[in-house]
Image: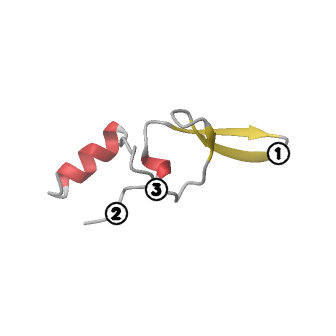
Amino acid sequence: MRDYHCCATCTHFRAERKNEKMIYFCSRLGYETKTTYKFNCWNPKEKIKNRIEKEGGA
């Protein structure tokens, strides 16, 4: 099974373009993050939940 646990797959993950640069942040924690970071508050997006269930990891 793949490891989907990372900020980019979380419902709290946000991406914005500012001054030609992408800024990634967590709307729950309120600070900048990176797509590959992992936090215990991870809440996967619905499509990720479905992929995990499909792979038998739920």
Q: Amino acid at mark 3?
A: Lys
Secondary structure beneath dot 3 equals: loop
Q: Amino acid at mark 1?
A: Glu
The picture quadrant where one finds residue 32 is: top right
Cα–Cα span, label 2 and label 1: 30 Å
Secondary structure beneath dot 2 equals: loop
Question: Can you tell which of label 3 and label 1 is closer to the viewer?
Answer: 3
Secondary structure beneath dot 1 equals: loop
Specify which label sits upstream in the sequence, 2 or 3.
2
Query: Which disc, if any, is residue 20?
Result: 1
As drawn, which residue projects farthest toward the bottom?
Answer: 1
* Display coloring: secondary structure
Give coordinates of residue 2: x percent, y percent: 31, 65
* Left-right relation of 50 to 15: left
Q: Amino acid at mark 2?
A: Asp
Q: How busy is the neighbourhood of tag 2: few (under 14 within 10 Å), some, or many (20 plus)?
A: few
Cα–Cα span, label 3 and label 1: 26 Å
Residue ID for mark 2: 3
